[in-house]
Image (spheres, rainbow, N blue to C red):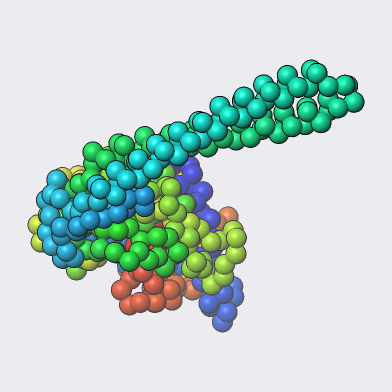
Amino acid sequence: MKRKIFRVIASVLSTALLLCMAGCNTASEDAVSVQSVSMITGMGSVGLADRYAGLVVAGSTEEIQVDQSMTISEIHVEVGQDVVAGELLFTYDNEALMLTIEQLKLEIEGLKNSVETYKQQVKDLETERNRVPDSQKFQYTLEIQTLEATIRETEYNIGIKEKELAHQEAMSGETQVKAGITGRVIAINEDGGYDNYGNPLPFMTIMETGNLRIKGTINEMNRDDLVAGMPVIIRSRTDSSVTWDGYVDYVDWENPIQDDSYYYGYTDEMTSASKYPFYIVLTSYDELFMGQHVYIEPGETGEEKQDGVWLPSYFISDIETSPWVWAANSRDKLEKRSLTLGEYDPMTDTYYIESGLEAEDYIAFPDETLEEGMPVSKYDEDMFATDGGGDMGGDIAVGYGVAVGG
């Protein structure tokens, strides 16, 4: 089922890209748009490889909020200081806390006394109502109902105060706040403040040191391709032979990042898509550094594919009998190119091409209207590359907007 869904998505995306390519080549309206194999397979800046852009970040951060009902008496650390898990960060003023507890107890006692007084007044009014003529009973009934409503409201307030008292009493034995992780204090906001989104800033933030992880971003269209625990390969952008092992820690589905970029030059409610951050735990991170840009690929280094062309199956016709693709020949005409297929990778739905196709060749997406001899219009990598780094502006790392990264 997943393979069928992948085929459908790829077909739609490829068709959309080919339409865009056709729009960029108005001089040859009847030509068939073809794309280089290197780009389709991820060997160029745009392709359909199962690869995501990633960024090396700190292992985790701890954000500590202040209990607004308490007063801080002393801060024991400063910004830039390294701390270990369990180290004292700051203490609350216990004297102020005890005064708050005593005040709450007095307020609760006063409210309970008021309830008893109201209840006695109700009894007195009920006795008097039984003695007066019927014409006067209604007035007594109104007064009784008013008192009963006041009793219910007061009892509700007592409940709130009692919960607050229980909280304060629990806090009275926890006046010391300690670090939950080993790391570095990167922020202390004694004066409060808000972030760029209007959210209150945490009082103190600690960034974990000694551990690194990888942060990537996944698109809605391939949100099912990553699951917790899946092994991945982290590959250097500058030297593809340098790799690290890791696994998917989690995908943060609760905090989508709205993608305000556009697909193929336009955007609307149907084309804009949410992106979701995901995190990779590394089994080793020698020579990695904070802020380094990398690639994330499903799999393990011991299971890496052999070098060469791995072509998505939906470009190949008659796979089970005599496989072939629509390819551009030396005269820029369309032809049926026979292939010799090797190993199949079910994870990415790709075949290893043993012969018949090279990375520099150009092929077309299969279509019933195609015929041999039709002229072709070649799609070049720089039509969409906007940052010179092969990341299409930094958002879409590889694959027609399928694989996205941070």
Inspect this view and state whether residue 136 appears. Answer: yes
Residue 393 lies, in percent from the top left, at 39, 72
Q: Which image quarter holds the C terminus?
A: bottom left
Compare residues 182 and 3 and report the one nearer the observer.
182
Q: Residue furthest right?
A: 135
Left or right: 135 with respect to 263? right
For residue 193, what is the image quadrant?
bottom left
Q: Residue at x 53, y 55 (%)?
A: 12
Residue 165 lies, in percent from the top left, at 38, 37
Left or right: 57 with respect to 402? left
The number of numbered badges drawn on the structure is 0
Residue 313 lies, in percent from the top left, at 41, 49
Compare residues 36 and 119 and report the one nearer the observer.
119
Inspect this view and state whether residue 279 appears. Answer: no
Q: Residue at x 86, y 27 (%)?
A: 136
Q: Residue furthest left?
A: 286
Q: Residue at x 13, y 49 (%)?
A: 87
Compare residues 158 and 329 and report the one nearer the observer.
158
Residue 121 lies, in percent from the top left, at 65, 27
For residue 126, what is the image quadrant?
top right
In this picture, is 179 found above or below 75?
above
Left or right: 343 with respect to 123? left
Q: Residue at x 80, y 18 (%)?
A: 131
Q: Residue furthest bottom?
A: 27
